[in-house]
Amino acid sequence: MARAELTPMVAANLLDYDEVCRTFSWDAATSELDLPGGRWNIAHEAVDRHVGAGRGHQTAMRWLPRRGESEDITYSELADRMARFVGVLQGLGYPSGARVATVLGRIPELYVGVLGALKAGGVVAPLFAAFGPEPLRQRLALGSFEVLLTTPLNYERKIMPIRPDVPSLRYVLLVGEDVDEDERAGVLDVRRLMAEATPVVTTAATGPEDPALLHFTSGTTGTPKAALHVHQAVLAHHITGSLVLDLHPGDRFWCTADPGWVTGTSYGIVSPLTNAVTSIIDEADFEVDRWYRTLQDERIDVWYTAPTALRMLMRIGAEVASGYDLSNLRLVASVGEPLNPEVVRWAHATFGVPILDNWWQTETGGIMVANFRAVPVKAGSMGMPVPGIEVAVVGADADTGEVDVDERGEPIEGADAGATGQLAIRSGWPSMFRAYLGNEERYRRCFVGSWYLSGDLVHRDADGYLWFVGRSDDVIKSAGHLIGPFEVESVLIEHPAVAEAAVYGLPNPVAGDIVAAQVVLADGHRDDEALRSDIVAFARRRLGTVAAPRELTVTAALPKTRSGKIMRRLLRARALGLPEGDLSTLETST
Ligand code: ATP
Ligand code: MG
């Protein structure tokens, strides 16, 4: 049966991109939120407003535990659990919210804790549960967290040893069976507290500029930064969920990112709920059959995932996918790294829908540049600015990297279509970060005139599509040419023997830099001299001699951040015998 017959077509939320861009304003978009009494609170917009509007019976989350039966939580139940968590915080002596961190896997308590802390008016940071004690110490101390939600095992192994270094931490609320409480140390059983708490249904009277979420960057460039976001961000979360991810009330939506990363919070917690969908939450990590089974059995309508996962699925092959019925999928979106054209083509053929790449950062809080359902996809392009977002491609001094500015101190936009420059965003969008905690100076340096500088290089084609070239630190200057690693990597993975590739520059006395590559081979291929030469020759034919790798090595796996991004700078450091640096070290001014 043809796909269209299986999936009744749902009209896209954004039908005419140009028209929506012309008429869109963030002020007018606030009418899509509830904002009772002019108050802004993410948790209210995500949960309570739906209960007030009579949608409380709808399933907000379907939780898939690692093993065993799934659990459905309605919007009403979520609202009740949130209210109880506010009661818990008040009972502990925080009448207007606390600074709350979580170190939990993807279990319901994580979502209740984050939303409850927001409802209470506090600031919350969901920390990645696989971090060891040192990265946790740094993050907890930097944010002066007062309450931590975690498991007994995490507490014992990772928090107890560092607790003396985090004097702000008064309470550790443990999630688990048979929790050993220690009142003097503030170690309490959160399930007991929740059961005994008086629910507080009133939401804190937070305003648009009140701090809400603290997110740490991935640390791809070696130094994670702590980006602070405010309640107003919910407007961007909501609108982008609607216009880019095309969420419709009642959709079944799966965001595979962990809430320890910004994607897993903005689009794994907030946006799906404000858009009244059913969010599928899988406790388990990536596993090919489980993922295909989840797409099929949960009848996922909209799937938001990452290039690293798509590349892994591609590596396993389309035959595995053909064993599953994926016909329900209406939209697949990707973020986090450039999405190679080869992957776009493979995924389109495999899933039956185009893969919509989109671009944003921890600092931007929400999607800034995207492909849309109603706009043709150009494989390899990250798309066009989201309505309400103004971008510029700005030039920089070739030697210093300083952005060129005019007499008013505003960056100068690259005049020509196709010119590579830094992606800048007109500051002031709702989900813009408001600080790098502990590093004001670095925050100030991100802004030039009225623009935020992203640190990523792009070019814009004549149709207005943006193409990612590379991070400004990662681009390779070779024999007078600027080479973006992404372009070279994308060609390399088109070679049938190459599953993944990372490209970086190595200093060379003549050329400035030469292009070096490390590749992971696809299943069934063996590393030998002939294969390596063949891959290099293939790249030369496609890219020419300047951009093709001069050095190519085969490796079993590429180094990646915890959030799954290739760390090109680490490969370069290793190749040069430089110190790798402590990649968990936070960047602060102190
Ligand atoms: P750090 O700032 O600590 O070095 P990071 O930049 O990887 O880490 P994130 O904020 O998680 O931390 O990632 C944002 C970056 O990811 C972007 O600046 C960009 O370089 C890359 N990125 C995200 N989405 C895309 C995309 N669709 N195409 C290309 N690059 C992307
Ligand atoms: Mg970054």
Image (cartoon, helix red, strand yellow):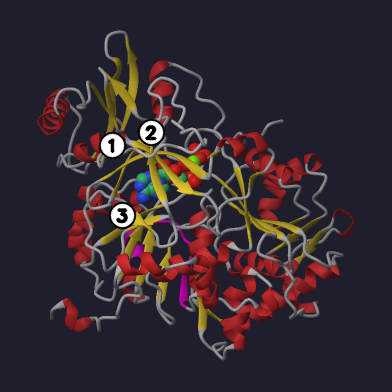
Residue 383 bears which disc, if any? 3
The residue identified by callout 1 is 419
Distance from Cα at disc 3 to Cα at disc 1: 16 Å
Q: Residue furthest right?
A: 184
CB contact under 8 Å: marks 3 and 1: no
Q: For the magenta stretch, what is the residue range?
A: 277-293
Q: Residue furthest front?
A: 407
Query: Is ligand 1 within 8 Å of the beta carbon of the residue shown at mark 2?
Result: no
Examine the structure image and report whether residue 284 is included in the region drawn in magenta.
yes
Query: What amino acid type should be assigned to the residue bearing mark 1?
Result: Ala
How far from the left and from the top, in percent, is residue 22? 37, 65
Q: Is residue 185 left or right of residue 107?
A: right
Residue 75 bears which disc, if any? none
CB contact under 8 Å: marks 2 and 3: no
How far from the left and from the top, in percent, is residue 559? 41, 35
How far from the left and from the top, in percent, is residue 141? 73, 43
Q: Residue furthest top?
A: 509
CB contact under 8 Å: marks 1 and 2: yes
